[in-house]
Amino acid sequence: RATLPSMLKQAGYKTAAIGKWHLGLGDGAIDWNKEIKPGPLEIGFDYSFLIPATVDRVPCVFVENHRVVGLDPKDPIQVDYEKKVGDEPTGKERPDLLKMKLTHGHDNTIVNGISRIGFMSGGKSARWVDEDIADVITCRAVKFIEENKARPFFLYFATHDIHVPRTPHARFKGTSESGLRGDVAQEFDWSVGEIMKTLARLKLDKNTLVIMTSDNGPVLDDGYEDGAIKDLNGHKPSGPFRGGKYSLFEGGTRVPFIARWPKNIEPGPSAALICQIDCFATLAALVGQKISAEAAPDSVNVLSALLGKSKKGRDYLIEDARGQALRKGSWKFIPANKIATEPIKAKNKNGVASEPQLYDLASDIGETKNLAVEKTELIREMAARLDTFRSAKKTRTE
């Protein structure tokens, strides 16, 4: 299947994936002591330096291209997600050894004083120090830009911040007014700043498209006792939106999407409806690559919206969390959930209910007024459209 990096590589771009991966590596059981593939290099990236899953999961090592970084062959890595391997203590067995306590899950092998999801033994020389991760991956990103300053390049830089465990470097700890979660947000800002400063130093900043976006809405307690809730200090992570990560409401599915390209984009907000999946068709149009009929089946070319030349993006958008919802302009439809037993209530944060829901986000961004009873014809139209999309092999029409 065609991917964004493979398409850009065909257009002459040097491509790299640096940071959190969590998209799968290898084929079946992975031997972390040998070549690890398939991975990013097999789907269009020229270079990769990865956190192989998430930081709260083992193995707690970096993978560069096909190999674990700094691995001592005399101390091989073993990983198992079902049963314990080796004799290292776990968070469940020895909570007294933890420098960050847990609230749920994350009670397997302890690495750097933090217990993780999954069991690991060996690989001592290769293990990361959580507090250094932002420095390590940011330096790799800067190095890739420097090495490719004279040619077109595509860098996918996936930070760990603000995912759990939240462990800011000492120079960021205590610098915010919202505890550790605020501190790692500051650390993320630093990483972005280092990349922006590199582009400016190399005189690439005016003609480089930089997109900053996120994978889901906010979550506070995600397994560790890090003060994320008690230290909010008035901050509202979801802003005016209802719900958060895992929710069908906008707080779960609406994410930041900031595009900076001084040579071609004027600063300012846009209400255009777009999706991260649209990056494929949009960037293909930008670099003059024709998409085959089979590629990017749900990607829509929204280049005019990205460049601020149009206020309209895509016509429809499926939002997916615990079930699916459909956006049509400012209208949002959430079908009744077949296994839900209760109608929607004010305290419901995940959007799952026994009745259909319809919200006009133009006047009700917080999704508080269900208009399903008043707009039965629109409900029928959007329900039929959602069913059509679900059964279609592709939704891209151009």
Image (cartoon, helix red, strand yellow):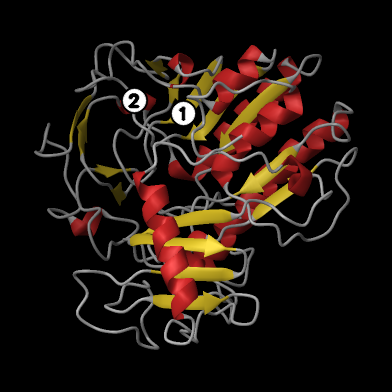
Identify which residue is drawn at 62% across, 64% down. Answer: 329
CB within 8 Å, label 2 to label 1: yes
Q: Earlier in the sequence, mark 2 or mark 1?
A: 2
Identify which residue is drawn at 36% across, 24% down. Answer: 125
Q: Which mark is residue 25?
A: 2
Identify which residue is drawn at 46% across, 28% down. Answer: 50
Q: Quadrant of the C terminus?
A: top right
Label 2 element class: loop
Label 1 element class: strand
Q: In which quadrant of the rendered view does residue 73 lie?
A: top left
Point out residue 388 in the picture as x, y percentages from the top left corner: 40, 51
Q: CA distance from mark 2 to mark 1?
A: 10 Å
Could you tell whether 40 is left or right of 108 in the image? right
The answer to whether residue 341 of the structure is visible from this angle is yes
**Front residue of this view, candidates 388 and 28:** 388
In the displayed orientation, state which residue is furthest to the left. Answer: 83
Give the amino acid at mark 1: Leu
Could you tell whether 241 is left or right of 269 in the image? left
Q: In which quadrant of the rendered view does residue 98 lie?
A: bottom left
Could you tell whether 288 is left or right of 156 in the image? right
Q: Which residue is mark 1?
A: 50
